[in-house]
Image (cartoon, rainbow, N blue to C red):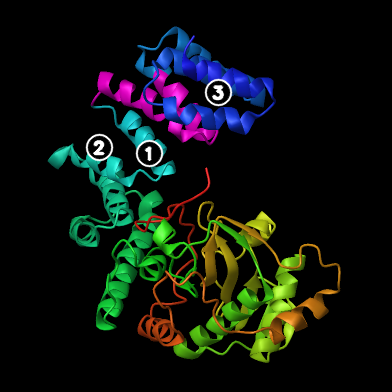
Amino acid sequence: MTNAMDEVRRFLKKDDLPGAVRSLRPHAETTPIAELAKAARALADAAGFKDLAGAAKAAAKRPGEPQTLYDFGYACVERGIAFLAVAPLREALRLLPDSRALRAELVSALEDENRHDEVIELLSGRGAALPAWPETYLLVHHTLLAGDLDTAARIGRALPAPEDPQWADAHDRQTRRLHRTDRARRARSAAGHADPLGRTDLRGWHYGLTGGLLGTLSPYGWDAGMTGRFAYLGDTHETCRHGLARLALALEAAGRRPSTVSLLPGRSDRILGLAAARVLGLPSVPYEPSRTDTLVVAYDLNAVDPDLVRTLHARADGQILAEHATRWTNPPAVSADFSTLLCQFVVPPWKEDPRPEEEIARDIARADAAADQGDGMTPPDPDEDFRAFASAVRDGWLTGPRDHVASPGPVPSSRFA
């Protein structure tokens, strides 16, 4: 019995399935695959995942068969534990080094874990033998997410348009991202930013990858590895009000003046939407997907009904989507046009406040709009810098679909396990 299996059983005895999953991370690529599969089967049995349990059982019995290893890895990816898929898929690819299916599934597993450098190594190792679609497209994609814009642009320019129409949207999406990141870097360089599209330029990369404007940077924990993001945020009326002030700056800098504020049905969304309507001096109306020339306000898109979120992927004419708290470790299905802040966990300031939505919205609109001074260790983020960036990229803002971006990109931040 391995240490990995001991840990899994210890947590499962306490009915702590998430803890059992976390306990396998340190062992995922050092434990023999047969033993790893036995541990994965225990997890799958506890979770009721029959597909994963069956694949893990077969891999434990026949860890030297490429198809069995592929099935095990595939099931891990499908069940959201991609870190367990890497070792069996690597072994399968070692046995069948020319298998495109195995390579594609290993890329998928590494992508889910945001291990972009490893994907680059895997794909670029094929040299001139690497097919254009989708492999070279994926190489460009991960090179960009790893932060190497010049190489991504060079390879991307040589990538031919796909013959298969199923890749047309991906090609268009990649073209937009390459254009936005180049535009963002030029804007940051022109403004004298110390690290234009480098490892600390969170706002520049956020725009380049998502197309959205990041209103504020966290004033806490910069020197502790947060680089402008929050991990846990106990939100306040003042933070919400400052975010609305930055939203107003973005609209002004881009020359946009929506005629209404559209209210999504969730309580938090309605509170913030009503506050936005007060701050911007606009009437509020119920959200309708086809409504034009409107500002749609969400507090946290991950808390909005998924069917409703899907209607926001393709924008109506003049529609602007603003989200207050964007979950950077679990990005929403659509990327907002404006995000006040990036956080891992958030607690709304009205969680224990039973008052009517309109009263809370009024308090937010009246709150101090000044920025939180934070811990004094974060680089300054004055209104003038944000306005200048929003103005510099205004022509590319609010164009194209609001695509989901699963990766946080090349700017690292500390996170809770």
Q: Is residue 314 above or below residue 259?
A: above
SS class, disc 1:
helix
Between discs 2 and 1, the one toward the N terminus: 1
In the foreground, 354 or 54: 354
> Can residue 247 be seen from the camera position used here?
yes
Q: Position of residue 148 (x, y in %)?
A: 24, 57
- Magenta stretch encompasses residue 167: no
Q: Residues under labels 2 and 3: Cα distance?
A: 26 Å
Tag 2–tag 1 contact (CB < 8 Å) = yes
Viewer can see residue 56: no
Q: Amino acid at mark 2?
A: Leu
- Return the mark for residue 80: none
Residue name at image x 68 percent, y 92 percent: 281
Expressed as whole percent of the image width and height from the top left, the position of residue 22 reads 53, 32
Residue drawn at the location 44% of the way across and 59% of the way down: 226
Circle 1 packing at 10 Å, graded few (<14), some (14-19), many (20+), is: many
Residue type marked 3 = Leu
Q: Which residues are magenta?
A: 69-97
Residues at marks 2 and 1, CA–CA distance in whole angstroms:
10 Å
Residue 243 vs residue 120, the one in the foreground: 243
Instruction: Choose between 77 and 312: the one closer to the eye.
Output: 77
What is the quadrant of residue 187 in the picture? bottom left
Q: Is residue 85 shown in magenta?
A: yes
The rendered magenta stretch, by its main secondary structure, is classed as helix
**Which residue in the structure is indicated by mark 2?**
122
Residue corresponding to mark 1: 110
Residue on which the image places disc 3: 52
Q: Is residue 143 left or right of residue 18?
A: left
* Kind of residue sitting beneath label 1: Leu
| Front residue of 237 and 155 | 237
